Image (cartoon, rainbow, N blue to C red):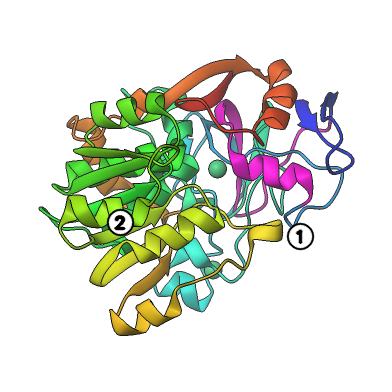
Amino acid sequence: MKAVVFEKFGEAPTIQTVPDPKPAADGVVIKVEATGLCRSDWHGWMGHDADIRLPHVPGHELAGIVVAAGKHVTRWKAGERVTVPFAVGCGHCFECTSGNHQVCEHQSQPGFNAWGSFAEYVAIEHADTNLVRLPDEMEFATAASLGCRFVTSFRAIVDQGRVTPGEWVAVHGCGGVGLSAIMIASSMGANVIAIDLTEEKLNFAKKIGAVATINASTTPNVVKAVKQITNGGAHMSMDALGHPTTSFNSIANLRRRGRHVQVGLMLGEHARPQVPMDKVIAFELEILGSHGMQAYRYPAMMEMIRHGKLKPELLVGKKISLNEAPAALMAMGGFEGIGIGVVTKF
Ligand SMILES: [Zn+2]
Ligand SMILES: [Zn+2]
């Protein structure tokens, strides 16, 4: 099969012909029909992820068609249209059996500790636990765009952030994660403040539900601005970018008993950011992470999509071919344009 391969961290990936994958006894092989481009692929390529063994095929936001299933797979067969969370749970550890597959102790992550979906085919383990059936009307590109940023934001807002109608939600950073969070929090009835450095993204944030915006490039004190708009601070706030400044602001702009959810990755030199711990204690703040979403939580989100309450297709950006993927991957270190780039031609 054709695949995007990198042999050294930070050196240009190339298109290569590699052996077709075979399904594990409890796994499947999926013909990839769409795969999203994500900043975490860029982090992986830069060598920020200790799980990656070289040579490596990146890609973890995928949708496609099952072409082969191992002998122990009971729920899936060739021909079915599927997607999969980026953290693939083993189904047997304590976390999985208690319903928390997204933090499985033995999780496999295609595109990180296994070869990923920047390829014609990808092998996925533990298929019965992790595959998600796609609604007939959902395009593969939309399904792929859910894989990481959208589902992580869904879990961050709904399950971790526990956002309720009427609450103030601040979203720091309006890339793929941030825009997803804005759409989801708005659909839950929250009042959302979008914060970014560019007017273009803030205008888009308004179109998908933000009630207020803050341009951090022209606002000297973002925390103060959030507190003014919300009359005391946000109930829930998210760092959707993953930067020491946005992470700090997201915690500091909370009102008493507020919840901060960290979704933007903090890796390399940013892995240990400053936290206003004095405020965490005095205000009884909660600091939470969100790491993907369990396959069994997808149906709730899919129903909201089916009825038009969530429109992830609005967040799909440029569609490109696999041949264009190496250059696009290397460019992910810069700031994203609006929308999630997706490879749709293989
Ligand atoms: Zn597990
Ligand atoms: Zn991703």
Of helix, strand and loop, which one carries label 1?
loop
Marks 2, 1: nearer the viewer: 2
Q: Quadrant of the C terminus?
A: top right
- Look at the image and give the residue range highlighted in magenta: 18-47
Question: Could you tell whether 1 is left or right of 61 in the image?
Answer: right
Given the current orientation, which residue lies at the most extreme front position? 220
Residue 251 to residue 187: above or below: below
Q: Amino acid at mark 2?
A: Lys
The response on whether ligand 2 sits within 8 Å of label 1 is no
Question: Could you tell whether 289 is left or right of 342 in the image?
Answer: left
Q: Which residue is at 40% across, 47% downward?
A: 220
Residue 240 to residue 102: above or below: above
Residue 208 in percent (x, y) is at 25, 30
Q: Quadrant of the N terminus?
A: top right
Task: Please tell me in which quarter of the rendered image ligand 2 is found.
Answer: top right
**Res 137 visible:** yes
Residue 175 to residue 248: above or below: above
Find disc 2 in the rendering and name its residue.
224
| Lower position in the chain sequence, tag 2 or tag 1 | 1
Q: Is residue 40 magenta?
A: yes
Give the label on residue 50, or none: 1
Q: Which residue is at 31% across, 67% downward?
A: 259
Q: Which residue is at 46% across, 62% downward?
A: 248
Q: Amino acid at mark 1?
A: Ala
